[in-house]
Image (cartoon, rainbow, N blue to C red):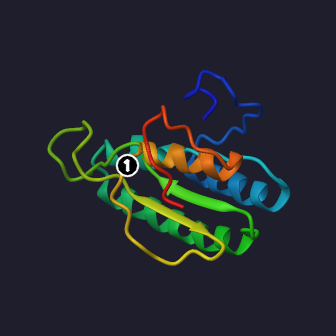
Amino acid sequence: IRDLFAGVGVHVKHAGPTNAEGIAETTRLLGEVPSGLIFVNLVETDQVYGHRHDVAGFERALVEIDTAVATWLTLLRADDLLILTADHGVDPTAAHTDHTREYAPLLAMYAGCVGRRHDGLLADVGATMLAWITGRRAPALPGDPFV
Protein backbone atom coordinates (compact mmCIF):
# COMPACT_ATOMS: atom_id res chain seq x y z
CA ILE A 1 0.00 0.00 0.00
CA ARG A 2 2.83 2.38 0.82
CA ASP A 3 4.02 2.10 -2.78
CA LEU A 4 0.55 2.91 -4.15
CA PHE A 5 0.59 6.22 -2.25
CA ALA A 6 4.32 6.94 -2.74
CA GLY A 7 4.65 6.73 1.04
CA VAL A 8 2.52 9.84 1.57
CA GLY A 9 0.44 9.47 4.73
CA VAL A 10 1.51 5.87 5.25
CA HIS A 11 3.46 5.61 8.47
CA VAL A 12 4.11 1.87 8.70
CA LYS A 13 4.62 -0.67 5.93
CA HIS A 14 4.08 -4.36 6.55
CA ALA A 15 5.54 -6.61 3.88
CA GLY A 16 3.07 -9.08 2.47
CA PRO A 17 3.73 -9.98 -1.16
CA THR A 18 1.26 -12.88 -1.11
CA ASN A 19 -2.41 -13.01 -0.23
CA ALA A 20 -1.67 -15.47 2.58
CA GLU A 21 0.88 -13.10 4.13
CA GLY A 22 -1.43 -10.09 3.73
CA ILE A 23 -4.32 -11.98 5.28
CA ALA A 24 -2.20 -13.21 8.20
CA GLU A 25 -0.82 -9.73 8.86
CA THR A 26 -4.30 -8.18 8.66
CA THR A 27 -5.62 -10.73 11.15
CA ARG A 28 -2.72 -10.01 13.50
CA LEU A 29 -3.16 -6.24 13.22
CA LEU A 30 -6.92 -6.42 13.82
CA GLY A 31 -6.16 -8.08 17.13
CA GLU A 32 -3.40 -5.64 18.12
CA VAL A 33 -4.02 -2.15 16.71
CA PRO A 34 -6.25 -0.12 19.07
CA SER A 35 -7.17 2.50 16.46
CA GLY A 36 -6.18 3.70 13.03
CA LEU A 37 -6.42 2.51 9.46
CA ILE A 38 -5.36 -0.91 8.24
CA PHE A 39 -5.17 -0.78 4.44
CA VAL A 40 -4.41 -4.08 2.68
CA ASN A 41 -3.84 -4.97 -0.96
CA LEU A 42 -4.31 -8.68 -1.67
CA VAL A 43 -2.39 -8.31 -4.89
CA GLU A 44 -2.24 -11.93 -6.01
CA THR A 45 -5.99 -11.93 -6.67
CA ASP A 46 -5.46 -9.30 -9.36
CA GLN A 47 -1.92 -9.66 -10.69
CA VAL A 48 -1.30 -13.38 -10.38
CA TYR A 49 -4.75 -14.81 -11.07
CA GLY A 50 -7.18 -12.28 -12.54
CA HIS A 51 -5.00 -10.73 -15.23
CA ARG A 52 -3.30 -14.04 -16.02
CA HIS A 53 -6.49 -15.97 -16.80
CA ASP A 54 -5.95 -18.39 -13.92
CA VAL A 55 -9.61 -19.07 -13.15
CA ALA A 56 -8.85 -21.85 -10.65
CA GLY A 57 -6.31 -19.65 -8.85
CA PHE A 58 -8.77 -16.74 -8.83
CA GLU A 59 -11.39 -18.99 -7.24
CA ARG A 60 -8.90 -20.23 -4.61
CA ALA A 61 -7.97 -16.62 -3.80
CA LEU A 62 -11.63 -15.65 -3.34
CA VAL A 63 -12.24 -18.65 -1.07
CA GLU A 64 -9.11 -17.78 0.94
CA ILE A 65 -10.29 -14.17 1.32
CA ASP A 66 -13.84 -15.24 2.19
CA THR A 67 -12.50 -17.49 4.94
CA ALA A 68 -10.37 -14.64 6.29
CA VAL A 69 -13.32 -12.24 6.29
CA ALA A 70 -15.23 -14.63 8.56
CA THR A 71 -12.35 -14.38 11.05
CA TRP A 72 -12.00 -10.61 10.63
CA LEU A 73 -15.68 -10.09 11.44
CA THR A 74 -15.16 -11.76 14.82
CA LEU A 75 -12.29 -9.35 15.56
CA LEU A 76 -14.20 -6.12 14.82
CA ARG A 77 -14.87 -3.82 17.75
CA ALA A 78 -17.98 -1.67 18.17
CA ASP A 79 -16.34 1.36 16.52
CA ASP A 80 -14.65 -0.49 13.64
CA LEU A 81 -15.55 -0.26 9.96
CA LEU A 82 -14.47 -3.03 7.58
CA ILE A 83 -14.54 -2.17 3.87
CA LEU A 84 -13.65 -4.69 1.17
CA THR A 85 -13.39 -3.41 -2.38
CA ALA A 86 -11.22 -3.39 -5.49
CA ASP A 87 -9.89 -0.72 -7.80
CA HIS A 88 -11.51 -2.33 -10.83
CA GLY A 89 -13.39 -5.38 -11.99
CA VAL A 90 -11.60 -8.26 -13.65
CA ASP A 91 -12.88 -11.26 -15.55
CA PRO A 92 -10.24 -14.00 -15.58
CA THR A 93 -12.04 -15.65 -18.51
CA ALA A 94 -11.74 -12.58 -20.79
CA ALA A 95 -9.71 -13.00 -23.98
CA HIS A 96 -7.32 -10.18 -22.99
CA THR A 97 -5.36 -9.35 -19.83
CA ASP A 98 -6.58 -5.76 -19.47
CA HIS A 99 -9.15 -4.49 -17.01
CA THR A 100 -12.68 -5.57 -17.82
CA ARG A 101 -15.87 -3.66 -17.20
CA GLU A 102 -17.38 -5.53 -14.27
CA TYR A 103 -18.39 -3.52 -11.25
CA ALA A 104 -15.88 -3.51 -8.42
CA PRO A 105 -17.15 -5.32 -5.34
CA LEU A 106 -17.98 -3.30 -2.24
CA LEU A 107 -18.71 -4.95 1.08
CA ALA A 108 -18.86 -2.97 4.32
CA MET A 109 -19.49 -4.09 7.88
CA TYR A 110 -19.80 -2.17 11.12
CA ALA A 111 -21.76 -2.48 14.37
CA GLY A 112 -25.47 -2.15 13.67
CA CYS A 113 -25.03 -2.70 9.93
CA VAL A 114 -27.94 -4.22 8.06
CA GLY A 115 -27.42 -5.50 4.55
CA ARG A 116 -28.30 -3.18 1.70
CA ARG A 117 -27.14 -2.49 -1.82
CA HIS A 118 -24.96 0.49 -2.75
CA ASP A 119 -24.38 1.26 -6.42
CA GLY A 120 -22.32 4.40 -5.98
CA LEU A 121 -18.89 5.52 -7.05
CA LEU A 122 -15.55 4.20 -5.85
CA ALA A 123 -15.06 7.75 -4.53
CA ASP A 124 -17.82 6.93 -2.02
CA VAL A 125 -15.32 4.68 -0.23
CA GLY A 126 -13.00 7.63 0.38
CA ALA A 127 -15.89 9.84 1.46
CA THR A 128 -17.08 7.14 3.84
CA MET A 129 -13.64 6.68 5.35
CA LEU A 130 -13.23 10.42 5.85
CA ALA A 131 -16.62 10.68 7.55
CA TRP A 132 -15.99 7.59 9.69
CA ILE A 133 -12.54 8.68 10.88
CA THR A 134 -13.07 12.44 11.24
CA GLY A 135 -16.84 12.82 11.58
CA ARG A 136 -16.91 15.34 8.75
CA ARG A 137 -17.53 15.51 5.02
CA ALA A 138 -15.55 17.25 2.31
CA PRO A 139 -18.11 18.69 -0.14
CA ALA A 140 -15.36 19.76 -2.54
CA LEU A 141 -14.28 16.14 -3.03
CA PRO A 142 -16.20 13.58 -5.09
CA GLY A 143 -18.14 10.85 -3.36
CA ASP A 144 -20.87 10.47 -0.79
CA PRO A 145 -20.54 8.49 2.45
CA PHE A 146 -22.60 5.30 2.44
CA VAL A 147 -22.67 4.90 6.24
- Considering only vertical position in the picture, is 65 above or below 18? below
Q: Secondary structure at mark 1?
A: helix
- Considering only vertical position in the picture, is 109 above or below 21? below
Residue 58: image x %, image y %? 38, 57
Between 67 and 31, the residue placed more toward the observer is: 31
Asked whether residue 42 is in view, the answer is no
Horizontal arrangement in the rendering, residue 106 relative to residue 103 (left or right): right
The amino acid type of the residue labelled 1 equals Tyr
Residue 9: image x %, image y %? 69, 28
Between 22 and 85, the residue placed more toward the observer is: 85
Residue 94: image x %, image y %? 18, 48
The residue depicted at 69 percent of the width and 38 percent of the height is 15
Residue 143: image x %, image y %? 43, 43
The residue depicted at 85 percent of the width and 55 percent of the height is 34
The residue depicted at 62 percent of the width and 77 percent of the height is 112
- Residue named by callout 1: 49
